[in-house]
Image (cartoon, helix red, strand yellow):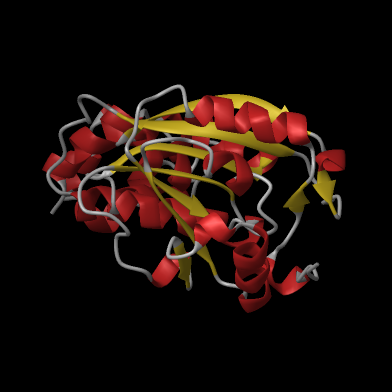
Amino acid sequence: MYTLKKSLGQHFLKDENICRKIVSVIRERPFTHLLEIGPGGGALTKYLLEIKGIDFKAIELDNEKVDYLLKTFPALEGRIIHGNFLEIEKPFEGNFTVAGNFPYNISSQILFKVLDWKENVETLIGMFQKEMAQRVAAREGSKVYGVISVLVQAYFKVEYLFDVNEKSFQPPPKVKSGVIRLTPREYPPAMNSGDQFSLLVKTAFNQRRKTLRNAVKELFDAAILGEELFTKRAEQLTVEQFAALTFKMK
């Protein structure tokens, strides 16, 4: 079999009902290219390999898991990328779907990588620590609304699909999990540049208890800072308001 490595945040899905539920969600939208991140012991992989007429690839960092997967699922030959998802080039030309039970210790980094590929990621279905999943889906005014919420929602529609109990994993994690789906927004909000947008959002939430006037004062001229919107805190602004502010930055 294989061993579990805490250093890689490995908690392997064992609940077949949850596996089938996730795969059912993946199949709700049409796709021809699919990347699974962190197949681990192959809980989802065995179902994904059954999908006909697609180009399927899986990326796995752990040597032992790569060997196990190739021995257990011969159909994976030539389809496994042995490497670190955070360091790879785009796995397909054109658009593709991303899925997986993501390692919780790098889940935010996975989302930032997906944002780098936003022009080509047509859907993402992922299992995250519940707290992270809720943050990604949070709306303005929520205590968990933050940088990852705004940056992801600027480009993707986020749906929180369902919870997953700790007992669905081996070993059981100490936290609950949640599955979310990202689909590209048809009309992302207009912004001066993606870099400015990212800088503004990160700066605003870096001091989220302060008003915008104090948190982002280095990014705007004094006359602009006098506007009423700057009396609000970062968590009170919509994604669209952040995007609109980029046109007023220095």
201 or 58: which is nearer to us? 58
Rendered image quadrant of residue 72: bottom right
Q: Position of residue 3 (x, y in %)?
A: 80, 71
From the viewer's perspective, is residue 216 above or below residue 168? below
Q: Is residue 91 left or right of residue 16?
A: left
Q: Position of residue 129 (x, y in %)?
A: 67, 45
61 or 105: which is nearer to us? 61
Q: Position of residue 239 (x, y in %)?
A: 33, 32
Q: Is residue 249 left or right of residue 16?
A: left
82 or 125: which is nearer to us? 82
Residue at (22, 24) in percent of width and height: 186
* Quadrant position of the C terminus in the picture: bottom left
Residue 227 seen in the current view: yes
The number of numbered badges drawn on the structure is 0
244 or 28: which is nearer to us? 28
* Quadrant position of the N terminus in the picture: bottom right
Rendered image quadrant of residue 118: top left
Q: Position of residue 191 (x, y in %)?
A: 16, 39
Residue extending furthest bottom?
Answer: 63
Residue at (65, 27) in percent of width and height: 21
From the viewer's perspective, is residue 238 above or below residue 46? above
From the viewer's perspective, is residue 54 above or below residue 203? above
Residue 223 seen in the current view: no
Residue at (79, 37) in percent of width and height: 15
